[in-house]
Image: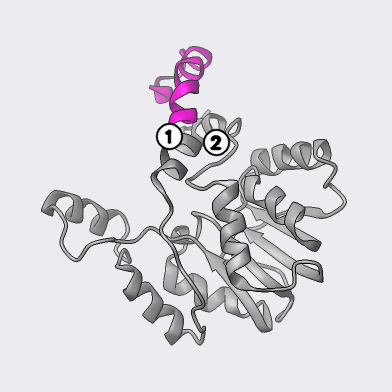
Amino acid sequence: MTAFDLLVALHKPSERQGPGSTETTIRALNLLGIDQSSQLNICDIGCGTGAQTLDLARHTSGKVIAVDIFDAFLEELNHRAKAAGLDHRINTQKHSMDELPFAEESFDLIWSEGAIYNMGFEKGVHYWKTFLKTGGYLAVSEISWLTDQRPPDLEAFWKEAYPEIDTISGKIKVLEKAGFTPLAHFVLPPTCWLDHYYLPLEARHETFLDKYSENPEAG
């Protein structure tokens, strides 16, 4: 297995492959102010194993297309959707988020939690807008600075790892430049990182290392 395969194997059993929670997904959905009982066409981009996909299906009507590039994540989401009785509402598709096959103006809502940075925020919001219906909504989470000044080492790390990192106000300007009218934003609470992502990952780490002990990449 490659290092990338191992990374997928480590994250596949997780409820989430990044920060988030059911509470914050529902909060974001409610802030949009859309009629959740209408037959919405929704696309969840970078869905992973689909914790938020399932929440979207539970709290809206219509269909959810769940897009990810990893077969293992989509297979897991299919299992979870079937177990939840939502497989008739969720359609998983393997695509790269920057090469989507959908027709223009296909969706009422495009959703993406912790994934847009993979293609870059500015490129993502401009590209994905193509697939939104007139009056449609885009809901994303994005890593952002919460202060105007940061420790130099921390700032240097993130500017190398993700040059587009910026403050929330900077991200809002990008959205406005792309033709969006921002409705609302909020900061994910620490529990979204700790309780729903890092700590479950840490709890499985020893078992993962035992399983792949013969692979030097696993360490």
User: Is-magenta flag for residue 171?
Assistant: no
* Residue 45, horizontal then vertical, whole percent: 61, 59
Q: Residues within 10 Å of mark 1 (few under 14, many from 20)?
A: some
Total marks in image: 2
Residue 215 higher or lower than 84, as above or below: above
* Residue 127, horizontal then vertical, whole percent: 55, 76
What residue span does the magenta drawing correspond to?
A: 198-219
Label whose residue precedes the other's in the sequence (2 or 1): 2
Residue ID for mark 1: 198
- As drawn, the residue found furthest toward the left would be 152
Q: Is residue 99 visible in the rendered structure shown here? A: no
Element type where label 1 sits in the image? helix
The residue that appears at 60% across and 30% down in the rendered structure is: 13
From the viewer's perspective, is the residue at label 2 or at label 1 nearer?
A: 1
Residue ID for mark 2: 8
The image's colouring method is: one colour
Quarter location, residue 159: bottom left
Q: Residues within 10 Å of mark 2 (few under 14, many from 20)?
A: some
Marks 2 and 1 sit apart, C-alpha to C-alpha, by 15 Å
Q: Is residue 219 visible in the rendered structure shown here? A: yes
Element type where label 2 sits in the image? helix
Comparing 66 with 195, the one in front is: 195
Specify the label residue 26 is tagged with. none
Comparing 71 with 138, the one in front is: 138
The residue that appears at 43% across and 23% down in the rendered structure is: 218
Amino acid under disc 2? Val
